[in-house]
């Protein structure tokens, strides 16, 4: 039986740089990643951007949509008021099996609301979580942090579910045989932290499906000692934005300082391949976006300021998630369907 190509729906109208940067990244992905792209949004605006690039690929299709949920709108209200908005149409393509995944750099809250309304939650999951993959101090080793913004307030059982979903992703996509799970906290001891942290610690420790390695302080998150790290969305979003800022500052410092003086210019030229690899490891644009885990479909939430490289990488992440059957593997995890998974605390 011939393998079917992965189809990814891209919200072409979502984001600060839509549709030009979104379309540019999608065109590159269509050319290099062996995926079919469904660009969702205003047909005239999308076609104009395609023509700018002189694209002649036959694996890009335009799917009409009417309007967009803006960043100023309340997410759920906007999604319900605008059923034909680009993010809703993109989610419906997955629901109707016309696409296997969605990428959006638009309103992240709207993407989550559209996913919940259009695709629904995986059985046994109370709250979906946004999982972001970070580099660590070790080459070719990453850590997934969740939640990074979907749930500002959490119960211990939500974090337990995040740990299970993150473990599945780490095992099958990041290729970690037995993912080590950490809990963000202000100290290593089990007695440290607020009530959420202390109660979650107990749940993670007592769940045989989780390889719990203890609390992870801020300095431990990128240490490589953990493969999955869980926290509530408030803390996770702060960590995400801080890490992005530090990465940007490091890149800017290298651009300014390395070429300084004659020796610096010569050295920078010699080190150019190394610097490129450094950029690939620490630049958030290289990671594309974060996966919304817990809904019945692959959904990648990209940065609102995403440019074409980020969109390209977001589509790559979506293809990888589809190829590894990550949704099916989470659905098949028996723990999620057990009522006794955790107490409702």
Image (cartoon, rainbow, N blue to C red):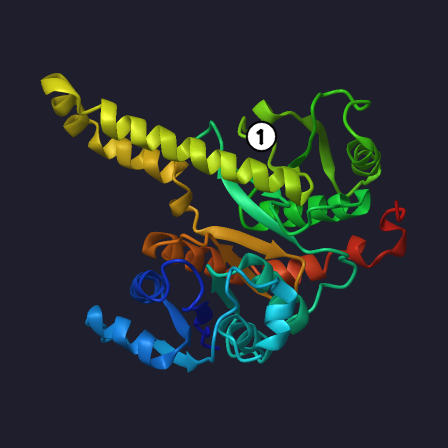
- What residue is disc 1 on? 221
Where is residue 223, by image quadrant? top right
- Is residue 177 at all visible to an observer of this figure? no
How far across and how far down the image is residue 73, in percent? 57, 63
How far across and how far down the image is residue 3, in percent? 46, 73
How far across and how far down the image is residue 147, in percent? 64, 45
- Is residue 137 at all visible to an observer of this figure? yes
Is residue 33 placed above or below 245 in the rendered structure? below
Would residue 58 appear left or right of 85 to someone viewing this image?
A: left
Q: Which residue shows up at 17% across the image and 25% down it?
A: 259
Where is residue 263, by image quadrant? top left
Q: Which residue shows up at 86% across the image and 56% down it?
A: 338
Q: Which residue shows up at 58% across the image and 42% down it?
A: 237
Where is residue 345, by image quadrant? top right
Report helix, strand or loop for mark 1. Answer: loop
Residue situated furthest front in the rendering? 72
Q: How many circles with numbers are drawn on the protein?
A: 1
* 140 vs 76, nearest the viewer: 76
């Amino acid at each position: 039986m011939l393998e079917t190509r992965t189809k990814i729906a891209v919200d072409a109208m979502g984001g600060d740089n839509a549709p030009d940067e979104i379309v540019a990244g999608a065109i590159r992905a269509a050319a290099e990643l062996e995926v079919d792209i469904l660009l969702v949004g205003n047909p005239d605006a999308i076609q104009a951007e395609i023509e700018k690039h002189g694209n002649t690929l036959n694996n890009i299709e335009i799917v009409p949509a009417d309007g967009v949920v803006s960043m100023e709108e309340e997410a759920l209200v906007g999604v319900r008021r605008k059923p034909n908005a680009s993010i809703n149409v993109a989610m419906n393509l997955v629901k109707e099996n016309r696409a296997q995944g969605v990428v959006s750099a638009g309103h992240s809250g709207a993407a989550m609301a559209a996913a919940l309304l259009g695709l629904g939650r995986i059985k046994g999951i109370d709250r979906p979580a946004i999982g972001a993959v970070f580099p660590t101090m070790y080459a070719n080793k990453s850590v997934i942090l969740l939640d990074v913004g979907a749930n500002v307030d959490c119960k211990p059982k939500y974090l337990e579910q995040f740990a299970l979903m993150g473990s599945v992703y780490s095992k099958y996509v990041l290729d970690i045989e037995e993912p080590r799970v950490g809990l963000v906290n202000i100290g290593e001891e089990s007695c440290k932290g607020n009530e959420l942290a202390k109660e979650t610690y107990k749940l993670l420790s007592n769940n045989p499906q989780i390889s719990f390695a203890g609390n992870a302080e801020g300095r431990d998150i990128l240490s490589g000692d953990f493969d999955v790290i869980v926290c509530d969305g408030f803390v996770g979003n702060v960590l995400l934005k801080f890490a992005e800022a530090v990465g940007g500052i490091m890149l800017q410092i290298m651009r300014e300082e390395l070429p300084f003086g004659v020796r610096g210019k010569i050295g920078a030229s010699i080190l150019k391949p190394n610097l490129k690899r450094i950029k690939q490891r620490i630049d958030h644009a290289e990671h594309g976006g974060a996966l919304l885990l817990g809904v019945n479909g692959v959904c990648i939430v990209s940065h609102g300021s995403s440019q074409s490289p980020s969109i390209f990488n977001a589509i790559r992440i979506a293809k990888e998630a589809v190829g590894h059957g990550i949704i099916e593997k989470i659905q098949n995890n028996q723990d999620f369907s057990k009522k006794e998974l955790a107490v409702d605390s």
